[in-house]
Image: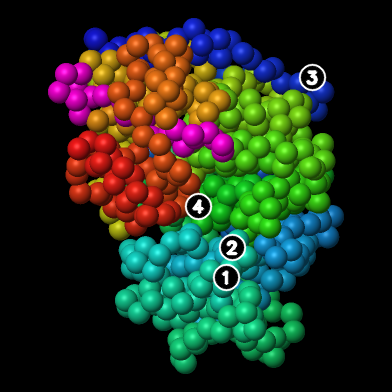
Amino acid sequence: MSDSQGSAGSAGTATTIDALLQESRRFPPPPAFAAAANVRDPSIYQRAHDDPEGFWAEAANRLDWYQRWDKVLEWNAPWAKWFVGGQLNASYNCVDRHVATWRRNKAAIIWEGEPGDTRTLTYRDLWREVNRFAAVLQDLGVRKGDVVAFYMPMIPELAIGLLACARIGAPHTVIFGGFSAEALRDRINDSKSKLCVTADGGWRRGSVVPLKDTTDAAVAECPTIEHVLVVQRVGPDVRQVNMQAGRDVWLHEGVEQVLRRTPHPIVAPEHLDSEHPLYIMYTSGTTGKPKGQLHTTGGYLVGTSLTHDWIFDLKDDDVYWCTADIGWVTGHSYIVYGPLANGASVVMYEGAPDFPDKDRFWALIEKYGVTILYTAPTSIRTFMRWGTEYPERHDLSTLRLLGTVGEPINPEAWMWYQQYIGGGRCPIVDTWWQTETGMIMITPLPGIVATKPGSATRPFPGIEPDILDEQGNSVPANTGGNLVIKRPWPAMSRTIFGDPDRYVQTYWAKYPGLYLTGDGARRDDDGYYWLLGRVDDVVNVSGHRLGTMEVESALVSHPAVAEAAVIGASDPITGQAIVAFVTPRGGQQPNDALTADLKEHVVRSIGALARPKRIYYTAELPKTRSAKIMRRLLRDIAEGRVLGDTTTLLDPTIVAQIKEQYASSEG
Ligand code: ATP
Ligand code: MG
């Protein structure tokens, strides 16, 4: 994203006094937090750097292995094998081994449905349910190596089902419950799933999401599907579903059949090779056609368990809540595998944050005494837009650590989160990672790393990123470039399922032997990483390269702006011109005076170069179903192209509205 001359340092050039001030705004770990933190010795960074394989081998001792590995890493770039020769089972590590300790009656999953119904499963309960589910899978002919698709609401059966699959060595692929029938069909077909697990519905903003109907539409065109296993979530009084004889089976009926054979079914966990496939997860599709990332067992579980423990500073009495959906990698790594491998108590919530009112998250935190909250910048910006009255209704004093993931967090939102949710006392871990990386890669360790609002700070111990120019040279401080990872890490995706060539082309071809993240970043003088957004989103104005993130951040720091997306549209004079799409905060009327003021505001905070040429107002921005802004669609609109893949879009009508507005203003 930054070539060697003119633009070198451009991200730096664009860094203004304001941004520098922000960079020097440091939040050292609060002393009491630091004194009790799980990681207190900064020398861990150096030790991991000097002997990464030794570091990961030590981490692997956190898990229970049936057979110890012979070799920590086998690396034939880009093909990695971790803990070669080792055997283990992820379900055993997340469930059985805790049942053998005092944790058997500790809450594993504290679940709340959107209507307010609740369920708490202890580790012992979880173990019982996982065994039953696994027995049902076996009855339906699922064997080691068969792929099982999940299209589910956020209910305990989703986590139980994944662990049941892991138990018998059947890789799972979870398709987010907000996806359409076509998106579901394509992922089932791509992954060649044999069984699809769904529910009669799930609650969302007071209505029932008709998951089974959508599944029926999808699997009609999925030749590999033999059975559909249906969880009764809402019940026949709320929604009747169609059950196709011979194909569809109710989970509770499957369990009854198992229990008729034996009242306490036990399915012994398979002894699986460390590299046995654990799951396939499709990326969000922010930049293009989703890629099915294949994650395997041993390295993945080591990476997620260690990062979860260290980054979230997990203690046995913590109540941990990651608000992501299990349909995304964040839910896999930091609701299911990492936390459960660590014996954590995990909160899980089915519904929307604004149902029945906009204080639902804060009500849940108060109700369950949540101590660790992990959420997304897009949610934080939404909460900011709703106003502080909602968190102020509740006692949030149990919180001791906050996290963010999914997008760069603008300093404005960071400060709001710190102040209004964290009460000024909680460290914030801004965690950078990807579906491909499987685990958090750049993040503070909250007991030893001072944070700076907007920076993901330092690589996790044992992770070695770099920032390169187009020629592959490491760029100097304060210069933007391509973020790469130089060494393999245990939770890395092993391939794109069914398409190894695309895996090589996408991630390993530009700089052979180095993993290309697709994100732009720069390092400051302290070696802190600042993520600049996707490389594809960088704007080139008169030869100067600007990260869209920087301009968006400047816009959002204006009191009238709730959210902003910035793109570069081709311009005959400057090459590209900055075009901004802005969602005003509640009560703000867009008009020419505001437009002029916003342009000046950007100039003041970044420089004249960054002045938006045009600003459009929109009530919503186009987002993926994982709530990330899809700038490529805005670019398509701005340049009059046919829209690229829109199947992962949350609300297609938004695009139509923006398109119309754009066309009328152009004319
Ligand atoms: P696709 O790869 O299909 O375009 P996607 O990249 O949105 O989709 P994910 O793997 O869910 O799919 O998202 C990873 C991306 O999210 C990262 O590459 C980065 O752009 C962004 N991201 C995640 N966490 C952070 C963070 N803490 N700071 C900055 N960016 C982040
Ligand atoms: Mg990506």
Q: CA distance from mark 1 to mark 2?
A: 6 Å
Please tell me in which quadrant of the rendered image residue 326 appears: bottom right
Query: Which residues are the magenta region?
Result: 570-590
Residue 315 percent location from the top left of the image: 77, 40
Q: Which mark is residue 328?
A: 4
Instruction: Answer with left or right where residue 460 lies relative to residue 107.
Output: left
Residue 445 percent location from the top left of the image: 64, 27
Q: Which mark is residue 320?
A: none
Q: CA distance from mark 4 to mark 2?
A: 17 Å
Q: Quadrant of the C terminus?
A: top left
Label located before the other in sequence (1 or 3): 3
Name the residue tied to disc 2.
Answer: 204
- Closer to the eye: label 1 or 4: 1
Amino acid type, callout 3: Pro
Name the residue tied to disc 1.
Answer: 208
Please tell me in which quadrant of the rendered image residue 542 appears: top left
Disc 2 residue crowd, few under 14, some 14–19, many 20+, Cα 10 Å: some
Q: CA distance from mark 4 to mark 3?
A: 35 Å
Q: Residue at point 72% right, 60% down? A: 111
Q: Secondary structure at mark 4?
A: loop
Instruction: Answer with left or right where residue 339 lies relative to residue 315.
Output: left
Q: Are marks 1 and 3 in contact (CB under 8 Å)?
A: no
Q: Are marks 1 and 4 in contact (CB under 8 Å)?
A: no
- Closer to the eye: label 2 or 3: 2
Q: Residue at point 49% right, 34% down? A: 589
Q: Which mark is residue 31?
A: 3
Q: Are marks 1 and 2 in contact (CB under 8 Å)?
A: yes
- Closer to the eye: label 4 or 2: 2
Q: Residue 573 in magenta?
A: yes
